[in-house]
Image (cartoon, helix red, strand yellow):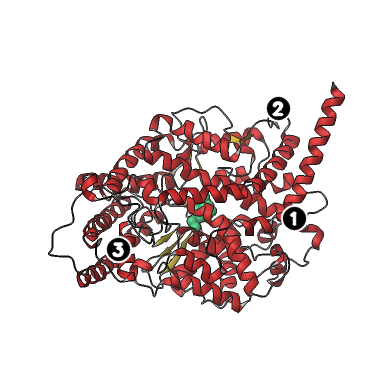
Amino acid sequence: MRLSHTARRRAGAAALMLSLTLSFNVVSLAQTGGRRAPAAGRPTVAGANEFVKQAEQRLARLNLKVSRASWVQENFITEDTELLAAEANEELTAAVTELALAATRFDRLSLPHDTRRKLMLLKLALVAPAPSNPTEREELTKITASLASDYGKGKYCPEGEKGKCLTLSELEPIMAESRDPEELKRAWLGWHSISPPFKAKYARFVELSNKGAREMGFRDTGALWRSNYDMSPEEFAAEMERLWLQVKPLYDSLYTYTRWKLSEKYGRALVREDAPIPAHLLGNMWSQTWGNIYPVLKPERSDPGFDLTKILVGRKTTPQQMVRYGEGFFTSLGLDPLPQTFWERSLFTKPQDREVVCHASAWDVDAQRDVRLKMCIKINAEDFAVVHHELGHNYYQMAYAPQPNLYQNSANDGFHEAVGDAVALSVTPEYLKRIGLIERVPDESADTGLLLRLALDKVAFLPFGYLVDQWRWKVFSGEVKPTDYNRAWWELRTKYQGIAPPAPRSESDFDAGAKYHVPANTPYARYFLAAILQFQFHRALCREAGFTGPLNRCSIYGNKAAGAKLRQMLAMGQSRPWPEALKALTGEERMDATAIIDYFAPLKRWLDEQNARHARQTDAARTAAK
Ligand code: X8Z
Ligand code: ZN
């Protein structure tokens, strides 16, 4: 099934939602002018059970068709594959829309738990709900398919250098490795030049999808997305804010330290300590993870002394071996090896002879054993982590495959994103030594360096994870109109991340569109949740493994008890409200940032000391200059 629609077949795909009652997010169809459910006699419990059974069969069939069409589209982008994917999606979208509307006739019945829950999941299944008018629906599915292709084909063709165009795969290493601000700025501006042509299409997509959402009884598509978490959309927005406020002090400490070090590196003219950080200096195209600039920021006396990228490259690691490392971790926990078809059907390397969507994704094509990875793997530490992330999706998919169709999903979409990352938190120096990648485990004096390196990825990500959907929620609600898309985007980027564009921007730019998940219409709040949940999972799994030391030194590698606990939660799929799944793994019922805060507590103390010392020195220098 395709991600921008119902969402489960491809991970990173939107979750079907599970909420206990629909009353808070679905108003009556009559109010919204939506289509009425077809009259088919008096609704009965038996009728509802039968309806669900048939719906699941129908969806399974259509999902499979969409999966295959989308897989081919994304591995072989042409006009034809794009159209075939759009058509398959249209058929599925039409079916889900029809079923979701028809399901409302059972709203007033007292139904068995599973029937009630599945009907609710059905109503929340579409990430891009479509109007029931066939012409508009066709327009919408064509737009979503073409935006996905457009992003996949995106290239920056510098003027005056005829024929030499750069793909994202070529620009990303520049962002990661270059320390030349002019070169970084060119790469940044270059990639952000691909998206202005998407803007009109995107704005039309918002209109059409909102219309579909309203016909289904939601205020807009953003409200539908926020209804996916067993609580009202308002409560969910408040949960996001609560979690953000929990972690903000940690981000602030890291941010202050980073800005100071970048100011030292690039000079006060470029990086002022009283102004936002220029977005092109943080080692990543979207400034979303900063691990690549660790060498610029590293503490002098506490460096772990190994560089995983150099080790992997030095050993001539192949993409396939990168995936084998990931698989090896999961099997060490007692989970099954990946099926033979995974190795035969996945894409690990960027093909030279055709256009593909390189953004990493994990697929479960037939909802049984046909799982696949699609990723243009680079041999570096970042992709080592991404491989674990993606395999987390595939292992989740295999674990919930025995569930009925409508339960084949994660507890909430943050869970899907968190599993592989939680496992990758166990990629400690000790683990790297066990699998023979390093010879010596650095002693405790290296912990600050290790924690800083990880924080640059995990903590730096938090405000970005939060703001992408802040922007989209405003776009869907109409609070931000197309004439303000870019201004609103940068307002949020400055407010939450504290960054600024490397050059003045205007409304002829569409900078949000240069981030995959916007043209691909993949909700993003999930990654924020995952950034928090993965530490909660890690803490629980380490407890299960009997580990009592500091969390950053815990690796659950080889621990079957932790593996069994994890597997038990994965196998629940979406059959129960997510707090129950969370409880099964962690004993906790709320998403809670204390795990990530505890994990980084020693680093925060260190950062605060450094920042305070620096502030004192700056003050002293200022006084002396007077
Ligand atoms: O999109 C992804 C995964 C696929 S679900 C590679 N991630 C987000 C991103 O790249 O922006 C993982 C973390 C955040
Ligand atoms: Zn993912």
Residue drawn at 39 percent across, 36 percent down: 199
- Disc 1 vs disc 2: which is toward the camera? 1
What kind of element bears circle 1?
helix
Please state which of residues 589 and 362 is positioned toward the viewer in this rendering.
589
Crowd rating for badge 2 (residues with CA inside 10 Å; few <14, some 14–19, many 20+): few
Badge 3 amino acid: Leu
Badge 1 amino acid: Pro
Residue 347 showing in the rendered view? no
- Give whichever of discs 1 and 2 has the lower sequence position: 2
Please state which of residues 212 and 166 is positioned toward the viewer in this rendering.
212
Picture coordinates of residue 488, whole percent (x, y): 48, 33
- Disc 3 vs disc 2: which is toward the camera? 3
Residue drawn at 70 percent across, 27 percent down: 269
Image quarter hosting the C terminus: top right
Picture coordinates of residue 592, whole percent (x, y): 57, 58
- Mark 3 to mark 2 CA distance (whole Å): 59 Å
What kind of element bears circle 2?
loop
Q: Mark 1 points at which residue?
A: 602
Asked which quadrant contains residue 42, the reply is: bottom left
Picture coordinates of residue 465, whole percent (x, y): 53, 48
- Mark 3 to mark 1 CA distance (whole Å): 47 Å
Asked which quadrant contains residue 387, the reply is: bottom right
- Mark 1 to mark 2 CA distance (whole Å): 32 Å
Circle on res. 507: none
Crowd rating for badge 1 (residues with CA inside 10 Å; few <14, some 14–19, many 20+): some
Residue 327 showing in the rendered view? yes
Would you place residue 96 above or below residue 581 in this image?
A: above
Picture coordinates of residue 528, whole percent (x, y): 53, 52
Q: Mark 3 points at which residue?
A: 119
Would you place residue 568 above or below residue 462 in this image?
A: below
Circle on res. 269: 2
Residue contact between numbered discs 3 and 2, judged by CB atoms under 8 Å: no
